[in-house]
Image (spheres, grey):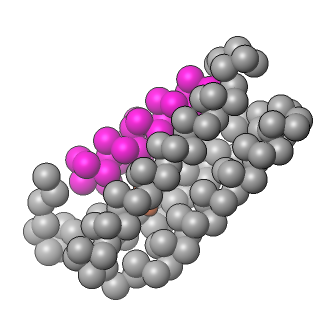
Amino acid sequence: MKDELHINIPAMDEKHDEFLQILSLIKSCTSKQFLPLFSELIEHTREHFSFEEKLMDKYEFYAKTEHKEEHKNLLGEMEYFYAQAQKMPMFGKSYINDYAYDKFKRHVINIDSQFAMFLKERNIELQ
Ligand SMILES: [Fe+2]
Ligand SMILES: [Fe+2]
């Protein structure tokens, strides 16, 4: 994972790393593997977001409402493209190849890093 994507909260970096691994698998997979891997990416994202949301609730993060809203939008978008891809694989491929990485990167850099800073300022160590 590129340095700019590291937020130095190991448990969160780990989720981000896994996301990028699945994304890189999809980018080079066969057309038969495309939908199952896309679905795996969505499942992983659902789990990744709910992990962060539980932490935001637990530590009463001041921007949790906005952060959760952003999660909801990103997940909704992935589900929309997955549904489209079931009818027309091309739509799903263009999302995966042209948008998924940028959307992910923007979220990590602008939104997750804010939460990471909050945890660090409070010296909160995650298990
Ligand atoms: Fe995240
Ligand atoms: Fe997040």
**Residue at image location 71% in from the left, 35% down from the top:** 97
In this rendering, is residue 109 above or below 6? below
Q: Quadrant of residue 7?
A: bottom left
**Residue 6 located left or right of residue 101:** left
Please state which of residues 115 and 39 is positioned toward the viewer in this rendering.
Answer: 39
**Residue 92 located left or right of residue 65:** right
Which residues, given as a range, are shown in magenta?
1-27
Q: Residue furthest right?
A: 88
Q: Residue 17: percent from the left, percent from the top?
A: 39, 38
- Residue 8: tell me if it is visible: no
**Residue at image location 61% in from the left, 59% down from the top:** 74
In this rendering, is residue 85 above or below 68? above
In this rendering, is residue 53 above or below 40? below
Q: Residue furthest bottom?
A: 62
Q: Residue 9: percent from the left, percent from the top?
A: 24, 53
**Residue 87 located left or right of residue 110:** right
Please state which of residues 25 and 2 is positioned toward the viewer in this rendering.
Answer: 25
